[in-house]
Image (cartoon, rainbow, N blue to C red):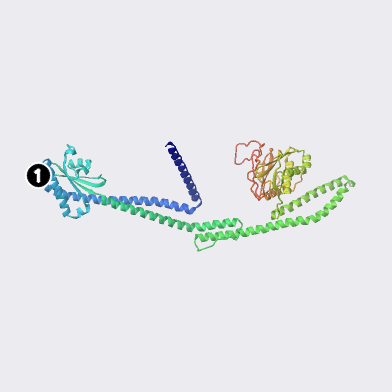
Amino acid sequence: MRQRLASFGWSAIALARRAATYGRRKVVAFGELWRHSVQFRVTVSTLALSSAVVFVLGMVLQNQITERLMDTKERAAIAQLQVVVQTAESELVGDAGQDEALRNRLNNAIKKITSSSTATQDTASSAAGAFEPVLAAGDPDETSEHAVYAGPYDKVPGGLRNFVENNSQAKQIHTAEGITYLVVGTPVTTTTRPLQLYLLFPLTTEQNTVATVQNTLLVGCLVLLLLLAGITNMVTRQVVRPVRRAAEAAERFAEGELDRRLDVVGEDDLAKLALSYNEMAASIQRQIRQLEEFGQLQRRFTSDVSHELRTPLTTVRMAADVLHASREQFPAGLARSTELLVDELDRFETLLGDLLEISKLDAGVEELSAELIDVRPIARRAVEQVKVIAGTAGSDIELDLPEEEVTAEVDARRVERILRNLLANAVDHGEGEPVRLRLVASDDAVALTVRDYGVGLRAGEAELVFNRFWRADPSRNRRTGGTGLGLAISQEDARLHGGTLDAWGELDRGSCFRLTLPRRVGEPPGESPLPLPPEDAAPARAPEPVQRNGHAELTVTVVEHEEVR
């Protein structure tokens, strides 16, 4: 038995939990629909307000109808009481007698009242309806058990008896044996002994009438609310549908369907909205076309100039190499000029190469040659390529690589170029401090950070480092002779992999660049395995929206495609 009770208890708990879960889901679904649908919100609000108004009106109508019915019933009952009391007084004139004689006279009077009320169907009696007469010889100084009466005396309420026995006419609504009565009473004054007359009018007809009125009002209110909900939904839909079409057209327009337009129907406000939207879309389309044409012309110009400059540059390079090879035969000043000429030609060739690369990236013709390889050798090669520059600057490059293989689908040439640019940038701004290259991998991503402890970045500069030709401090002497396009190209290379290139820095506390790449091409990298700001960064001070002193603002920038350096 106990096991059955325990099993029943657990079943009840499980059922309650399922019901609670189902209720929560419905509440969440209702909340989502409420937030996202104007049509649903307006319809529900109108229905709720209409329900309140209809409820108040229904209660007022019901109370008015009930009061009118009872008022009419009471007036008719009083009129009937006046007629019946005359009959009773004519039957009970003189000495009423004692006990059995009195009871016999009361019964005869009741029969006379009943027969006379049946024979006399006047307006008052017909409005009051059927009744049950009661005659009693009650005394306020005696209990009701000693009263002599005729008729259903036990149905008369005690409070009403007290009023009538004290020579007062009274009325009261009372329920007896499951039936509600309107009881009216008055004293009979033609006998030597005090007598009371009571008439009990059943309110069954009035209750049926009120119930019919309630049912009619309920059905009418429900029908009215349904009609209001339907009308509100239809009217709201007429307004919301064009807005939804406009929102859909705007989304398609934002996705690149520049020819998307709205249908203009009629001459109302919604038609004016559609017309205004179409004019705005046409204007934006023209401007976008112009910008695209201008961008194409600019990229073509850059590419053409870069290509055209290669021929004279090759000639100049050949002449410069001849001069450089014979520099020992020249005077000291002329030999130095020859060396400077070769250095600037090297920089010029690098600039042309970067311009060609950035023009290809802008044109979207670059392709990713990804293959599944170990990323660690790429990092080592990048370090080897900047070792000479680091040695000249007095900076040591520290490698923090895992012992096991870190495989990922990457374009080795592009990743190596990214790391080379980041390392050269760190050496150039490291002020002779060590530069650290760290590699960490997770299940979904590979992250590499290049950390320096040099001049760092001012507040807001982390958002500018990827802009083309941007320099943090133009007055500083650069050791690497960069073109100003390295970080911009690096960011585009990271974007081609589906990854991100982020920057952080604090003034006089160094900077950190983080490259995050997915381990498989086409899959999102997820959360980066390395934090930014780096773990060895100084603890953050009390957070402020913006610090203008340029010393302690922590900036983390997630690089977008449009923000390139």
Image position of 396 (left or right of 500):
right
The tally of labels here is 1
Name the amino acid, label 1: Gly
402 left or right, relative to 247 = right
Which sits in the foreground, 3 or 209?
3
Q: Horizontal placement of 63 versus 509: left or right?
A: left
Q: Which residue lies furthest to the bottom in this view?
A: 266
**Residue 236 appears in the picture as rendered:** yes
Quarter-of-image position of residue 12: top left
Q: In percent of the image, x 59 and y 57: which residue is there?
A: 253
Say which quarter of the image contains residue 431: top right
Q: How far across and down, in percent of the image, does residue 229 sit?
A: 43, 55
Residue 510 x, y percent position in the rendering: 69, 39
Whole-percent x and y of residue 422? 72, 44
Extreme residue toward the front, this view: 1
Instruction: Give the residue at mark 1.
Output: 94
* SS for dot 1: loop
Quarter of the image for the N terminus: give it. top left
